[in-house]
């Protein structure tokens, strides 16, 4: 693990793998209280909860079938930046049908992982790939768990739509910085061979 974290390029890609899912799950973690506050039926709650997975499957299917490796690599950055954007709509206390649409739109951001996986494997020495993938997955699960915990605690004192929208604002501010760190590490390290969005 120390060798992995000592490499700036690998470290930046790990952070890039961990951060976008944090903002994807903020809304998902609060769907039950959101539906309860709207006095929604169980059917509406089911629609809300399946929105993000539907978006993820749709996005990955389209990107995987319509784009080649280079196209998926170029999609990585904009898809990750998109992760927090749909949550901003909750600031306007949207109706449930629009909340479902927001969840679907949020799920589309998961397509960033298609380009990231290849980029990450290209950056990690073959002898360390097993440990690297374990660290990547563990970090993602931990980050999502922390985001859900913080979102739930915040929703105890603030309206649920406000918490989801605040998560979106934080993501819009933080994700470009994380992407900048990836680009900075990529320029200072060895070329991984797979371009990020905007790089030839």
Image (cartoon, helix red, strand yellow):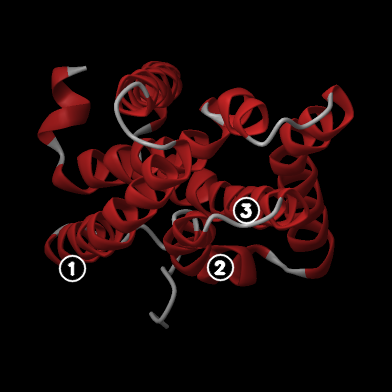
Residue position for label 3: 111
Foreground residue, 1 or 98? 98
* Mark 2 lies on residue: 75
Tag 2 or tag 3, which sits nearer the N-term?
2
> Answer yes or no: do the residues labelled 3 and 2 have beta carbons within 8 Å?
yes
Question: Where's residue 138, x and y in %?
Answer: 40, 16
Q: Residue at x 11, y 63 (%)?
A: 188
- Badge 1 marks a residue whose secondary structure is helix
Position of residue 192 relative to residue 200, above or below, is above
Q: Position of residue 16 (x, y in %)?
A: 33, 46
**Which quadrant holds residue 191?**
bottom left
- Badge 3 or badge 1: first in the primary sequence: 3
Return the residue nearer the eye: 125 or 15. Answer: 15
User: CA separation, marks 3 and 1?
Assistant: 24 Å
> At 31% from the left edge and 37% from the top edge, which residue is drawn?
14
Note whether 44 is above or below 128 in the view shown.
below
């Amino acid at each position: 693990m120390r060798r992995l974290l000592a490499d700036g390029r690998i470290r930046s890609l790990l952070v890039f793998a961990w951060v976008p899912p944090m903002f994807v799950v903020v809304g998902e973690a609060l769907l039950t209280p959101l539906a309860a506050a709207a006095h929604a039926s169980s059917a509406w709650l089911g629609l809300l909860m399946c929105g993000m997975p539907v978006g993820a499957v749709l996005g990955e299917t389209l990107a995987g079938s319509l784009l080649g490796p280079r196209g998926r690599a170029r999609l990585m950055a904009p898809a990750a930046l998109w992760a927090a954007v749909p949550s901003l709509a909750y600031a306007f206390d949207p109706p449930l049908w629009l909340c479902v649409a927001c969840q679907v739109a949020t799920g589309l951001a998961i397509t960033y992982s298609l380009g990231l996986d290849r980029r990450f494997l290209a950056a990690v020495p073959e002898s360390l790939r097993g440990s690297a993938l374990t660290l990547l997955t563990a970090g993602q699960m931990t980050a999502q768990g922390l985001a859900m915990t913080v979102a739930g605690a915040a929703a105890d004192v603030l309206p649920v739509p406000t918490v989801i929208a605040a998560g979106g604002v934080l993501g819009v501010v933080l994700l470009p910085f994380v992407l900048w760190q990836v680009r900075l590490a990529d320029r200072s390290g060895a070329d991984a061979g797979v371009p990020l969005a905007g790089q030839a």
